Image: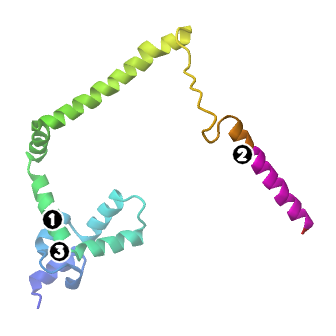
């Protein structure tokens, strides 16, 4: 059913016709994604932990998923537009919430660093400020006498287990 032009496109891609999902234009795959080996190399570059065999399997799976291939081709076409990055940057920064979020993170990060390095560190170093010590009530697990009781109970169980082990 494939004409010689399709056969030549598939041979250029390095795949059989059945290895490409129906509804995908082989010419566009070749133009925007390259050959199967090109795409496999990109897959390995993007996923450094992939072995050669795993990249081969994932590439084959990808080429059989018409929706993903067509979406990726559409993305590559959009990405080829010289204004793509400028437009996406403008879209992100035109939203006041995004700008406010960036400002909050920057101010918070600078503010914490300033407090730690300029205000707190010299006061701790001079002895003007002391470490904060919070004592917790004895009834909390791991505190005070109840913690000692738990430790002694664990030691008793351990010694019993050792005794039983030596008897057997």
As drawn, 136 above or below 118: below
Q: Which residue is mark 2?
A: 150
Which SS type dominates the magenta stretch? helix
Image position, residue 96 (x, y; %): 12, 34
Q: Say whether marks 3 and 2 touch (CB < 8 Å).
A: no
In 3D space, how far apart are the residues under numbered discs 1 and 2 (Cα atoms)? 61 Å
Q: Residue drawn at (15%, 77%), measured in percent from left and top? A: 9
Q: Is residue 87 left or right of residue 16?
A: left
Badge 1: how crowded within 10 Å, few (<14), some, or many (20+)?
few
Q: Residue drawn at (9%, 87%), measured in percent from left and top? A: 3
Image position, residue 140 (x, y; %): 60, 39
Q: Which residue is mark 1?
A: 71
Magenta extent: 150-167
Helix, strand or loop for disc 3: helix
Q: Residue drawn at (10%, 58%), measured in percent from left and top? A: 77
Q: Residue drawn at (20%, 66%), measured in percent from left and top? A: 34
């Amino acid at each position: 059913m494939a004409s010689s032009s399709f056969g030549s496109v598939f041979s250029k891609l390095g795949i059989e016709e059945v290895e490409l999902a129906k509804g995908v234009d082989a010419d566009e795959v070749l133009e925007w994604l390259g050959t199967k080996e090109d795409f496999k190399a990109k897959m390995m570059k993007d996923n450094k932990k992939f072995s050669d065999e795993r990249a081969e399997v994932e590439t084959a799976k990808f080429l059989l998923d018409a929706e993903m291939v067509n979406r990726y081709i559409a993305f590559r076409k959009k990405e080829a537009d010289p204004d793509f990055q400028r437009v996406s940057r403008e879209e992100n920064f035109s939203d006041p919430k995004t700008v406010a979020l960036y400002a909050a993170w920057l101010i918070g990060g600078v503010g914490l660093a300033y407090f730690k390095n300029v205000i707190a560190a010299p006061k701790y170093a001079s002895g003007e400020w002391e470490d904060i010590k919070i004592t917790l009530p004895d009834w909390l697990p791991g505190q005070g006498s109840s913690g000692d009781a738990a430790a002694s109970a664990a030691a008793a169980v351990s010694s019993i287990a050792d005794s039983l082990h030596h008897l057997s």
